[in-house]
Amino acid sequence: MKILIVDDDQNILRLYKEELEEEGYTVVTASNGGEAMELFEKENPDLVTLDIQLPDIDGIKLLRQMKEKRPRMPVIMSTAYDYRDDFSVWASEAYIVKSSDLTDLKAVIKKLGPAG
């Protein structure tokens, strides 16, 4: 399974990439919205983890763009802040608060992935 990780924090990108590759996933990373959409179309990921706060575009707008192109593809919103009350994040399949403990993220990926 191929996962696209979108986050402007290089430490998060590195951590997620290393941890998820250890789980056997193919991981592609993007640090802004423009790069994310380019990779989304070129790499055709099976799942996306998407930061809400990006330098060039709001992650929720990016979520909408991705869902317009591939409505059934699972997207996990990932943020350091609690946005659960913002109805626009409800278009995603899951929502996690960033942490160095990736237990929740891995569980959600397993659940949403093709074999899940």
Image (tube, rainbow, N blue to C red):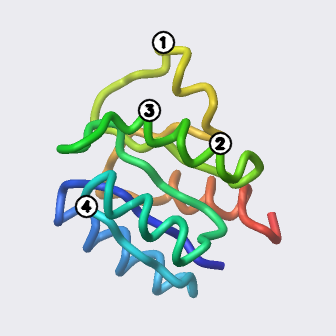
Q: Earlier in the sequence, mark 1 or mark 4?
A: 4
Give the secondary structure at mark 4.
loop
Question: Compared to 87, does 68 lie above or below?
Answer: below
Which label sits in the foreground, 4 or 2?
Answer: 2
Confirm or deny contact between disc 1 and disc 4 (CB under 8 A).
Answer: no
Q: Amino acid at mark 3?
A: Ile
Three-letter code, disc 4: Ser
Q: Are marks 4 and 2 in contact (CB under 8 Å)?
A: no
Count the numbered circles shown: 4
Q: Which residue is mark 1?
A: 85
Residues under numbered marks 1 and 3 in contact, where contact means CB atoms less than 8 Å apart = no
Amino acid type at image mark 2: Glu
Q: CA distance from mark 3 to mark 2?
A: 12 Å
Residue that mark 2 sits on: 68
Q: Earlier in the sequence, mark 1 or mark 2?
A: 2
Q: Secondary structure at mark 2?
A: helix
Q: Nearest to the eye among marks 3 and 2: give it.
A: 2
| Location of residue 97 (image quadrant) | top left
- Label 2 near label 3: C-beta < 8 Å? no
Task: State the residue position of label 4.
Answer: 31
Marks 1 & 2, CB-CB < 8 Å contact: no
The secondary element bearing badge 1 is classed as loop
Disc number placed over residue 60 in the picture, else none: 3
Instruction: Give percent across and percent down for residue 5.
Output: 41, 63
Q: Residue at x 53, y 21 (%)?
A: 88
As rendered, which of 53 and 108 lies closer to the eye?
A: 53
Residue 40 position, x and y percent, is: 51, 65
Of the image marks 4 and 3, the number of the one nearer the N terminus: 4
For the residues labelled 1 and 2, the Cα–Cα distance comes to 22 Å
Note whether 87 is above or below 80 in the view shown.
above
